Amino acid sequence: MISEQNMIIALHSLHSMRALRVWQSMAQRPPLIFVVSGTDLFQPLLKSGSISKDFQFVCSNADAIVTLADGFSRFYPKADRRQWAKKTQFIAQGAKPLPSSLKPSSSRIRAVVAANFRMIKDPLLPVRALEKLLAERMKTEEVSPQLEVLHFGSVSGHKYKRAVENSEHRISSCGLSWRWKGVVTQGGLRRWLGSSHLLIQSSLHEGGANIVGEAVMGRIPIIASRIPGNTGLLGMKHPGLFSVGSATGLARRLKEFISDEAYRQELKAASERLSSNHDLEKERIAWADLIENIGRCGRPSTTS
């Protein structure tokens, strides 16, 4: 039930359309805030080159559009870009600092991947990158520095389940290892992240992954694919970016990270500089101000 006293926050155009059709039929529509997700904006763009009709409807009718990474306005349709951009606001997801008691191991470098096994996450890209590093080490008989990559997330489908088993077996020599750790709670993931040296964010597209904010608040270095959802949080000049879908690019970044202390410190400093963007109080204030402003302006009566 939607009343005139409500304020609607829609989190995904397709998933919200049933409620929004009710909202559309009301004589006095309550204010509407639309939060853009990565799949909502980028999946249709990647498939067909245009946004979905549902996305078009919600953006056109929303009083405010919130993006969880900066710079998304440039992907709006040219005809609507100026109008939609005026009501678009970037609000970074806040995160608590990681527990200070957590310390990474000194015997090996540990990297964390947090992604369910879905195509848009490109979950096996870190495996392909490690295979390239492994091939190099087998030629030179190197076994150090040691690098372990721990992948957290759900696996569904025979293809991915078999890939997980094969990957754990293949990447387990010459000082390199890849292991799937399954699904953990947010608290569990934060503990693993806090005891790691690096976050790998390899998605094909994102709307602004919360795990990036978690890593930034923990001053954890980040190596990430050069997609809008990552550059909109890290910046276009972030030193840990690599080309989308490039195992070679990721392998190059990983090799530099495990062998170059100066590069590790550069990435750590980058996360530290960004930490204020993900302060929980800053996020709360941004949302409170937006809701207050939208509520104060109200919405005119309509019969359309």
Image (tube, helix red, strand yellow):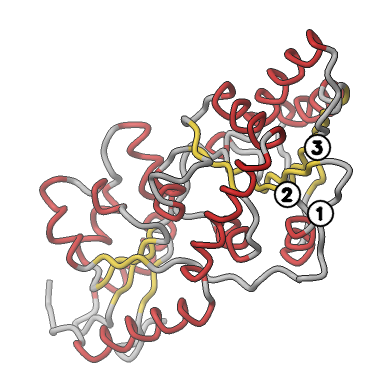
Q: Nearer the viewer, residue 181 or 150?
A: 150
Report the residue at 42% width, 84% height from top.
285
Which disc number belongs to residue 104? 1
**In this picture, is 213 found above or below 73?**
below
On screen, residue 4 versus residue 160, left or right, reads left
**In this picture, is 275 found above or below 107?**
below
On screen, residue 295 versus residue 41, left or right, reads left
Report the residue at 52% width, 54% height from top.
270
Report the residue at 65% width, 71% height from top.
97
- Numbered disc 3: secondary structure: strand
Q: Which residue corresponds to mark 2?
A: 197
Report the residue at 76% width, 19% height from top.
134
The answer to whether the residue labelled 2 contacts the one labelled 3, judged by CB atoms less than 8 Å apart, is no
Q: Nearer the viewer, residue 81 or 230?
A: 230
Q: Which residue corresponds to mark 3?
A: 148
Which of the 4 quarters of the picture holds residue 220?
A: bottom right
- Numbered disc 1: secondary structure: loop
The answer to whether the residue labelled 1 contacts the one labelled 2, judged by CB atoms less than 8 Å apart, is yes
**In this picture, is 13 found above or below 240?**
below
Could you tell me the amino acid type at mark 1?
Pro
Question: Percent position (x, y) of residue 36?
Answer: 38, 58
**In this picture, is 165 found above or below 99?**
above
- Numbered disc 2: secondary structure: loop
Q: CA distance from mark 2 to mark 3?
A: 10 Å
